[in-house]
Amino acid sequence: MVDSRQYRKPSAGIHPPYFYPSYVSSVKRAPMRPLIVIPQTLSEMTGPVFGHSDIGATDADLTNSGGGEPLGQRIIVSGRVLDENARPVRQALIEVWQANAAGRYLHKGDQHDAPLDPNFTGCGRALTDEHGRYRFVTIKPGAYPWRNHRNAWRPMHIHFSLFGAGLLTRLVTQMYFPGDPLLTFDPIFQSIPDEAGRARLISAFDWETTIPEQALGYKFDLVLRGREAIPMEN
Ligand SMILES: [Fe+2]
C-alpha cells in the first residue's frame, strides 16, 4: 500500500520571509534578487560530520559548564526530531545557545545592563538517539532588550541549530515558552505568517519530564518538513 502521507505538501507561510520590515535587520539582510540554487557535489554530501566521539558526556547539561550552579530556574528541554512522516531523525547534531536567567548573553556584543553568570556559558549540544530524541538540562532564559524599535524586548527563547547528514544541511530556529506575554510584540516571532507554525515554536510544559524538587520540564519537537514543519530561519 502506498503511504499517502508521503504526498502531503507543505503549507504556505510556515517559514518567515527574508524581508520583514518590522524586523529591522531583515531590511538590509534580505536578498533583493532571486536565490540561485547551487547543486551539492560529492564533497558536500560526503564531507565531515559529527559523531558520538565529538560530543562530550556533559555537553547537553548547560548547568554544568562552570565551577558551580548557575542562577535561575533549572529546566529540562527535551523532544524529538522527526521527518514529514513522523519517522525519527537519528544522529542529528543539535546545538543550543541562550541568554542566562537575567537575559544576558556571554558575548562581547551583549553589553546591556544585566549581570553575567560565571557559572553559565549558555551553550550546549547533543545528538539525537535511535528514536530521534534529545534532552538538555539548562536554566530558563530571561527576556532581554534589543534595539529593533522603542522598548523592544525579546521573549524568553532558546536558539536551536540542527545539522543533518552533512555540515551544509543546517537548520536554525528558536524555541519559546508558553504564556510569554512578549510573544505578541516580537517581530521575529510574528514574522512567521502561519499561526499554527508560530504555535509549533512554543514549547509545552511537560509534567512527565519535570524532576521533583529539581527541574521543570518543557517539550519541544522539531518536524523538519511537510505540513507540520517547524518554522526555520534559513
Ligand atoms: Fe537570542
Image: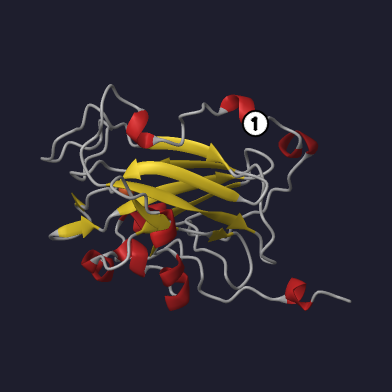
Q: Position of residue 2 (x, y in %)?
A: 86, 75
Say left or right for 126 vs 217: right
Q: Residue furthest front?
A: 212
- Left or right of residue 14, residue 46 in this image: right
Residue ranking furthest to the right: 1
Instruction: Identify the amino acid type marked 1.
Output: Gly
Residue at the location (50% across, 66% down)?
Answer: 15
Q: Is residue 194 visible?
A: no
Residue 2 appears left or right of 224: right
Residue 153 sits above or below residue 39 on the image: below
On-image quarter of the N terminus = bottom right
Residue at far left of view: 113
Q: Nearer the viewer, residue 195 or 53?
A: 53
Residue 28 percent coordinates (x, y): 36, 53
From the viewer's side, name the closer residue of 86 and 205: 205
x 31%, y 31%: residue? 121
Q: Which residue is mark 1?
A: 51
